[in-house]
Amino acid sequence: MGLKEYLFGFDSESRACEFLVQNGCEIVERNFSSRYGEIDIIARRDGILHFIEVKATSKDYEAIYRLTPQKYTKILKAIDFYLLKNGVEFDFQIDLITIEKHKISWIENISL
């Protein structure tokens, strides 16, 4: 990944965090990484832990298609590790935030 892609991803995740805070979330952690995978954003709202994947594009296709079954499987493994490591006993869900140019969409409680 080049610097341009890294900065685009970092900016997209920052925009997603701002959006989440505006919608009543507390950001718990960003870029949780383990050998199993990475979780872009972990947030809490109304007693529920949200594990959030951020997908963004500046092109003319929908960002939602960038979440593949393989990536989803890695996210699940990373969540299991996070919960075990931190002894968390909150209800949780997996969410997707897509950013397409200036439009941010929050799709809650996804599954593939």
Image (cartoon, rainbow, N blue to C red):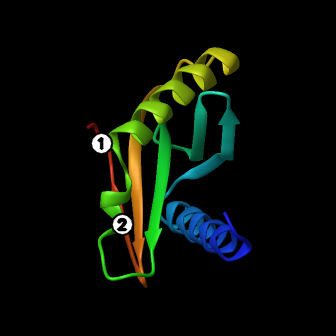
**Residue 8 x %, y %:** 61, 74
**Residue 12 x %, y %:** 57, 70
Q: Nearer the viewer, residue 13 or 28?
A: 13
Q: Secondary structure at mark 2?
A: helix
Q: Secondary structure at mark 1?
A: loop
* In this view, 55 is above or below 7: above
Q: Residue at x 43, y 84 (%)?
A: 102
Crowd class of label 1 (few under 14; some 14 to 19; many from 20; radius 10 Å): few
Which amino acid type is marked by label 2?
Ala
Horizontal relation, residue 2 to residue 83: left or right: right
Horizontal relation, residue 60 to residue 47: left or right: left
Quadrant assignment, res 111: top left
Q: Residue at x 50, y 40 (%)?
A: 51
Which amino acid type is marked by label 1?
Ile
Q: Which residue is mark 1?
A: 110
Task: For marks 2 and 1, give the one nearer the viewer.
Answer: 2
Q: Residue at x 37, y 51 (%)?
A: 67
Disc on the earlier residue, 2 or 1? 2
Q: Nearer the viewer, residue 50 or 40?
A: 40
**Residue 59 x %, y %:** 39, 81
**Residue 25 x %, y %:** 53, 53
Q: Quadrant of the N terminus?
A: bottom right
Q: Which residue is mark 2?
A: 63
